[in-house]
Image (spheres, rainbow, N blue to C red):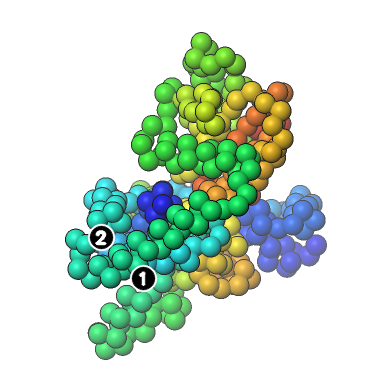
Amino acid sequence: MFEQTVLPHLDAAFNYARWLTRNDAEAEDVVQDACVRAMRFFSSLRDDDARAWLLTIVRNTWYSRVARLAKMSAGKPLNEAQDHWPDLALDPEERLVQQHTVSLVRRALEQLPVDFREVIVLREIEGLSYKEIAAIAGVPIGTVMSRLARARERLQTVLTLASPREALR
Amino acid sequence: MSCELVERTLDAYLDRELDAESSTAVRDHVRVCAACRGQLAGREALTKLVRGAPYYPAPDRLRARVLTQSTRPNSVRRVLGWAAAAVLVLSVGAALSLWRPETSRGNVIADAVVDSHVRSLMANHLFDVQSTDQHTVKPWFLGKLDFSPPVVDLASRGFPLVGGRLDYVGGRPVAALVYQRQKHTINVFVSPETGDSSTRDIVRTIRGFNLRHWIRDGMSFWAVSDVNSADLAAFASAAQER
């Protein structure tokens, strides 16, 4: 039952966790913890959407970990509250090294604030609908729309700056 | 529609999340407004670029650990209590699922289709014939089935054909055609129509997978995938146009 329902979505869970944490080892820990929770709350899976259900648990697991770690390291504010533009200016040498488009995109995505990053990942990489994303992130659909729009605007600017000739080809 | 409004709905338009009426309004506006057309092109280019970002599949050791965890949970002490709860939950769940009052034939087949889809992904047995050429895939089924499944490549619609295999659904051999949407797999199970009306035009989500059924030219088609329901609907209509 559990294996049949949850394991097919393990890739989606890991991909999502990997983008949230930006780190392989941490993503593995998060997904493993999430699966333990999923097993525990398996009875709460009412509707048929096991993927959205598992991704929600992954998200909650990650957030409670971040909160716990933040508490331990003298209360650094959550990333979600920050909304400053990261310094993405690449110097010319870096630009040469980083010509590879995939790594440019990865880097641009990783530097987005997590609220923006997750809607992009869930929409573009996981292919979820606004409704599913809203359920996972626990926000109204309107918020999903505005986050997506702002995230894309930011990515567009960043990617055009980072590689003016190639990025938007 | 004003430029300002178009700008605000451009993303939803691109993501096919607008209702038909607004969608038409945006399309009409973009046709005549070069500025908004440029905006849309920029967004489309960005989307294409971002979809090339890495997809991180779960490492095998994680898969193994989760499996061990769910089958032999007592290996980790702190899981012990939860395991007991899980076993209880699982057995109650199993009992409930046996108890489910209505299991129409349509539901049974829909479940079998999802099972076949999951099996093809888990066992890594997606193809018997791997080809993007419909003229290679179609003849491959000759002599293996007592019917000839229609095979079309839908690459131009964003759903490239990647191969086919023999599969079994509902106790009979069927043709499974495999398509791709970005990094997602779409399985299409084709068999001759049996006149069974219980499955007709089913659109459903089962265990997180979207599922659509249609009948065309005496053949029954089941499309199943983890792509979102709008994409699967687009796939179904593209497949039926041919």
Viewer-proximal residue, A132 or B218?
Answer: B218
Q: Residue A77 sits in which quadrant?
A: bottom left
> Can marks 2 and 1 be said to lie on one chain?
no
| Residue A38 in the image: above or below residue B71 | below
User: Does dot 1 land on a helix, a strand or a loop?
Assistant: helix
Query: Which residue does the numbered mark 2 point to in the structure image?
Result: B73
| Residue A117 in the image: above or below residue B198 | below
Residue occupying the point 66% across, 57% down: B17
Q: How much space separates mark 2 and mark 1, taking CA atoms?
A: 22 Å
Q: For this view, does A136 lie left or right of residue B233?
A: left
Query: Which residue does the numbered mark 1 point to in the structure image?
Result: A62
On what subunit does the disc labeled 1 rest? A
Where is residue B206? Give x, y as percent. Answer: 55, 50
Specify the amino acid type for callout 1.
Trp
- Front of the two marks 2 and 1: 2
Number of disc labels: 2
> Badge 2: few (under 14), some or many (20 or more) residues near its Cα, within 10 Å?
many
Where is residue B36? Give x, y as percent. Answer: 70, 57
Q: For this view, does B21 lie left or right of residue A38?
A: right
Q: Does any portion of residue A110 appear in the rendered image?
A: no
Where is residue B101? Give x, y as percent. Answer: 60, 52
Specify the amino acid type for callout 2.
Pro
Residue extending farthest to the bottom is A74
Residue occupying the point 60% across, 72% down: A140
User: Does dot 2 land on a helix, a strand or a loop?
Assistant: helix
Q: Residue A62 sits in which quadrant?
A: bottom left
